[in-house]
């Protein structure tokens, strides 16, 4: 099996304004995730779960250690095209409708128009948004907005899907 994610003795220290170590978020974290494997990170608040996800996404950099995602550094643009991400708080524009939202994110991934249209139809149907897709997202219930957020994270047909606080 191919290793999709590899963490090798990763340390992440957040520093204060003066550059002095303030919080040790991760201490010598090592693990790997194989292709096709489903993994959940469990732990109390402040245990480093979201920090770990942000390191995988290339949004943060390790203080020490090595991380690879699909055999490359996490911040590599080639890596980012294979990842779908649902953050803890949705990044949805309240004035757009579901179809416009998914089209926007499809454009972010440079999906051709014909592929975008197919993916949008598939995801609207699959996630039970069909019939509500012309309403502004600002009128959606929290549950409906969460489903649209999941659709957004799947628009690029990712090889790796990262869900932060998915419930």
Image (cartoon, rainbow, N blue to C red):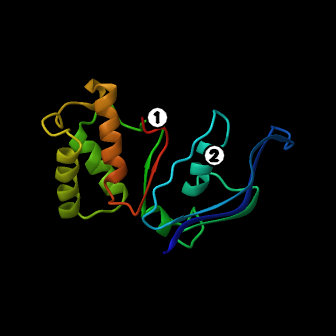
Q: Which residue is mark 2?
A: 51
Q: Position of residue 65 (x, y in %)?
A: 74, 63
The percent coordinates of residue 62 (x first, y second) are 71, 56
Q: Choose top left, top right, bottom left or bottom right for residue 156.
A: bottom left
Q: Secondary structure at mark 1?
A: loop
Q: Is residue 51 above or below residue 6?
A: above
Residue appearing at x 37%, y 37% in the figure: 92
Q: Residue at x 30, y 46 (%)?
A: 151
The vertical placement of 3 against 87, above or below, is below
Determine whether the residue tagged by mark 2 lies in a helix, strand or loop: helix
Between residues 11 and 156, which one lies in front from this camera angle? Answer: 11
Quadrant location, the C terminus: top left
Q: Residue 74 appears at what percent x and percent y?
A: 57, 63
**For the point 29% across and 25% down, which residue is it?**
141
Work out how far the residue at label 1 is from the one at label 2, CA to CA, in angstroms: 15 Å
Tell which of 108 and 4 is nearer to you.
4
Residue 89 shows which numbered tag? 1
Q: Is residue 136 left or right of residue 71?
A: left
Residue 42 location, x and y as percent? 57, 42
């Amino acid at each position: 099996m191919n290793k999709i994610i590899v963490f090798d003795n990763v340390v992440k220290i957040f520093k204060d304004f003066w550059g002095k170590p303030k919080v040790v978020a991760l201490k010598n974290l090592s693990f790997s995730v194989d292709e096709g494997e489903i993994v959940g990170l469990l732990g109390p608040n402040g245990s480093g779960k979201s920090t770990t996800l942000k390191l995988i996404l290339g949004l943060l950099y390790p203080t020490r250690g090595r991380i690879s995602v699909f055999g490359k550094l996490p911040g590599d643009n080639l890596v980012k095209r294979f990842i779908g991400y649902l953050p803890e708080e949705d990044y949805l524009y309240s004035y757009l409708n579901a179809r416009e939202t998914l089209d926007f994110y499809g454009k972010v991934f440079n999906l051709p128009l014909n592929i975008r249209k197919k993916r949008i139809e598939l995801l609207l149907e699959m996630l039970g948004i069909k019939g509500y897709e012309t309403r502004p997202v600002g009128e959606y219930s929290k549950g409906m907005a969460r489903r649209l957020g999941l659709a957004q994270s799947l628009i690029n047909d990712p090889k790796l899907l990262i869900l932060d606080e998915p419930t």
